[in-house]
Image (cartoon, rainbow, N blue to C red):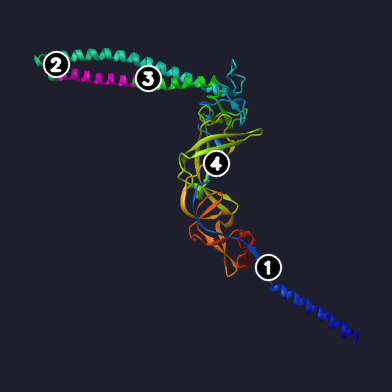
Amino acid sequence: MKKIIIILAVLGIIGLGAAVFLKGKNTEEISTVRLTKISNENISENLKFEGIVNAKKTYGLYKKVSMMIEDVKIKPGTMVKKGEELIAFKGVSDSGYENTGVSDIFIKLEEKKLEVEVLQKQLIELERKEKVVKFQLDNANDTAKIMKELLEQDGVSSLEANQYITAAALKDLEYHNVIQDIFLAKQKLKIKSNGLDEEIKEMSQNLAAPENGIITEVFAENGMITVPGKPLLNFASLDEGLEVKVLIPIYQSQGVTLGAGVDIISKGSLEEKQYKGKVTSISSVAIAEKTGKNEERYLTATVALDNSRGLMPGANVEVEISGKALKGINVVDAFSVVEENGKNYVYIVENSRARKVEIKTGIKTLSKYEVLNLPKGMEVVVNPFKVRDGEKVIVEKNN
């Protein structure tokens, strides 16, 4: 009898637990939400972005001849003045090249000097030949003239006269060929001579800053042999001025116009500096950048600065662009929008339940989204992160 009572008690406890579980299972959590309406407004808000300071003029510095680098005196970020020495080369300050490690380079230079000397001698020989051929041509022309006169007087046969006339014509052709050879020899000598002069000049100078600027990249190393025309470093001019590049998301680009005023804020280690400028260009081709699984498309805007004193290329700055006025568009507050997998959603309330609705958006600002597929006056949930699709909700009444 005692065992039966215990079994009945256990069954009673299990039954009570099951009843409690089933009761909890059938009870839904109900969230309280507030609603706001899609409104038709005129938007005129400043747009804020991150920007980077660029030099208007950047280029690579290189040597026109092969030389061995002795000392790289700069590094990325070095600010330099016009004429300041950046890279030193072996042989530039030496009286001889035998022990510099670059004798092969200077042997080639001597070979080029020899080539110029050979061309000079060839030109002298051609000029001498020109004088001889010119003398022979004058004599041939005089003889041919006499023979023509004798032929007219029947003093010589036509066969004999024609021999002298033909000889004069051939000599004239030879003379013109010599003149052409002299012209080509002078051109070749000029090219070789100018190239040699330029090479000698290059080999007698270390690499110096062509203007005030900042070194942005360095590719040179001590002991390296330069490749003619290949940059040894990248140089940003400070004399030509600075500008700011800004990436603007496509959805915000309609709010940016050419000539729009811009406020730039540079936050240094000690103080915050403000600058003024205006939008001077907006690219027509978008670039894509990925953030996690999402891909955003951007246009690049260029901002000209009224004054760039104190800014440096490569610095990150805050950019605030005065947006244009957008009239009569349906908008919803940005905090009512949920972004998922590159799509935008709002929650509406139907039959006391939250329902997630995808919205098509147009222009976006920091606080507003243009809604293209929902009507003015439609109510959406203000606090969408508190609810789930299909969840039962209670709408909070506005006081």
On the question of residue 59 being in view, the answer is no
Q: Which mark is residue 29?
A: 1
**Local SS, label 3:** helix
Q: Nearer the viewer, residue 176 or 78?
A: 78
Compared with 46, 293 (above or below) is below
Q: Which image quarter holds the C terminus? A: bottom right
Q: Marks 4 and 2, Cα distance to the nearest angstrom?
A: 93 Å
> Disc 4 designates what residue?
320
Q: Is residue 51 magenta?
A: no
Is any part of residue 12 visible from this angle?
A: yes
User: Which amino acid lies under the numbered mark 1 shown in the image of this protein?
Assistant: Glu
Residue 41 relative to residue 152: left or right: right
Which is nearer the N-term, disc 4 or disc 2?
2
- What's the magenta region? 159-182
x, y percent for residue 184: 36, 22
Q: Which residue is mark 3?
A: 186
What residue sits right under mark 2 in the picture?
148
CA neighbours of label 1 inside 10 A, class few (<14), some (14 to 19), many (20+)? few
Q: Is residue 317 above or below residue 394?
A: above
